[in-house]
């Protein structure tokens, strides 16, 4: 009798560990079924874009999922971003534009509360409509090569010899212990100029601005939202109430809105409930962004928007 009881307990334990990982999936499916058939609200996705941009994986993953989800009728980009690496901002911008072509009837609205500058504005410009309160900071459209230290004279003062072995004329560019030449400066400037021109072209096309007048809005200046509206960089002054109204108008929504956000999972829960290997992108992407923001790109030789 004791053996039979122990066997039952062992069997139940095995069943528990077999079906426990399925609980999040079943719960998710039940919630989806309920909201689809019994909740009268219309689903609108919210994509938070906060802090410095140095890794696009998490954001582009959820942007794609929200576009592909037929239950999501519109996407709201909530932006609090002072900028970041040029490639990251451009990657998110390109991803939004790519899916806008596939799903042209799904509007994308950008809402700013405090700051939307440089690479953050690059992302916002991919939206169909940009909203910000009058005193929010908008703009800073330009490109720079961050933290180009020159420490050669410091080494000489302390009689420290430094030798870098290289293959390639420009391989030591941005090495703080090697003096930069005029030729290298010219090369870096050409890279910045090309990056800057890409930025201007994309913004001018999205916002229907004249590239020939980019000196008015793309010389690195920061504007208040009220000033930015006059320049055509944003569409309307306002906050979340205005955003709701615009979303309803553009997505033809007549019901109340149910805001759908990307899932926030702890590490262990993420491991047992992930439905694909890229579900860990949130953790890794946030970690990369936090580290890079803390170091302020000091040791990463990237072009910064």
Image: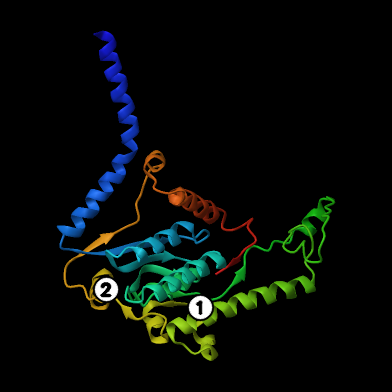
Residue shown at 27% from the left, 19% from the top: 8
Q: Position of residue 284 (x, y in %)?
A: 49, 49
| Viewer-proximal residue among 13 and 128 | 13
Q: Nearer the viewer, residue 168 or 79?
A: 168
| Quadrant placement of the N terminus | top left
Q: Is residue 117 visible?
A: no
Lateral position of residue 66 relative to residue 30, left or right: right
Question: What residue is drawn where x is 53% and y is 88%?
Answer: 211
The answer to whether marks 2 and 1 mark residues whose Cβ atoms lie closer than 8 Å is no
Q: Is residue 260 above or below residue 134?
A: above
Label 1 residue SS: loop
Q: Position of residue 292 (x, y in %)?
A: 55, 55
Q: Quadrant of the C terminus?
A: bottom right
Residue drawn at 73 percent across, 73 percent down = 187
Q: Which is more N-terminal, label 1 or label 2?
A: 1
Which percent across, then down, holds residue 289? Answer: 50, 55
Query: Which label belongs to residue 221?
Result: 1
Q: Residue 196: where, in percent of width, then height? A: 59, 77
Pointer 1 local density, CA inside 10 Å: few below 14, some 14–19, many at least 20? some
Mark 2 surroundings: few (<14), some (14-19) or many (≥20) residues within 10 A:
many
- Farthest top residue? 1
Q: Which mark is residue 247?
A: 2
Question: What residue is at 51 percent from the left and 78 percent from the top?
Answer: 221
Q: Nearer the viewer, mark 2 or mark 1?
A: 2
Tell me, yes or no, if residue 284 can be seen here. Answer: yes
Q: Quadrant of residue 261?
A: bottom left
Label 2 element class: helix
Q: Is residue 42 left or right of residue 76?
A: left
- Mark 2–mark 1 Cα distance, whole angstroms, equals 30 Å
């Amino acid at each position: 009798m004791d053996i039979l009881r122990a066997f039952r307990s062992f069997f139940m334990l095995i069943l528990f560990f077999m079906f426990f990982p399925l609980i999040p999936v079943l719960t998710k499916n039940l919630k989806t079924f309920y909201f689809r058939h019994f909740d009268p609200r219309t689903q609108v996705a919210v994509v938070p874009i906060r802090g410095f941009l140095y890794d696009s994986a998490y954001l582009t993953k959820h942007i794609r999922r929200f576009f592909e989800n037929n239950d999501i009728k519109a996407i709201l980009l909530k932006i609090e971003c002072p900028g970041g690496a040029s490639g990251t901002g451009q990657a998110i911008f390109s991803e939004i534009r790519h899916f806008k072509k596939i799903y042209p009837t799904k509007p994308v609205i950008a809402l700013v509360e405090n700051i939307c500058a440089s690479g953050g504005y690059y992302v916002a410009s991919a939206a169909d409509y940009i909203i910000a309160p009058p005193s929010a900071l908008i703009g800073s459209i330009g490109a720079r090569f961050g933290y180009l230290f020159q420490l050669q004279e410091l080494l000489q003062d302390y009689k420290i010899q430094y030798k870098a072995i290289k293959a390639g004329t420009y391989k030591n560019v941005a090495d703080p212990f090697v003096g930069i030449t005029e030729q290298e400066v010219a090369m870096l400037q050409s890279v910045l100029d090309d990056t800057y021109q890409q930025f201007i072209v994309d913004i001018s096309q999205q916002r229907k601005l004249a590239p020939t007048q980019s000196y008015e809005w793309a010389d690195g200046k920061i504007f208040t939202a009220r000033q930015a509206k006059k320049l055509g960089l944003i569409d309307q002054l306002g906050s979340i109430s205005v955003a709701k109204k615009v979303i309803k108008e553009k997505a033809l929504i007549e019901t109340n809105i149910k805001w759908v956000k990307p899932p926030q999972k702890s590490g262990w829960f993420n491991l047992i409930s992930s439905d694909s290997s890229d579900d860990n992108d949130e953790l890794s992407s946030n970690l990369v962004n936090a580290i890079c923001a803390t170091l302020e790109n000091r040791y990463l030789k990237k072009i910064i928007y």
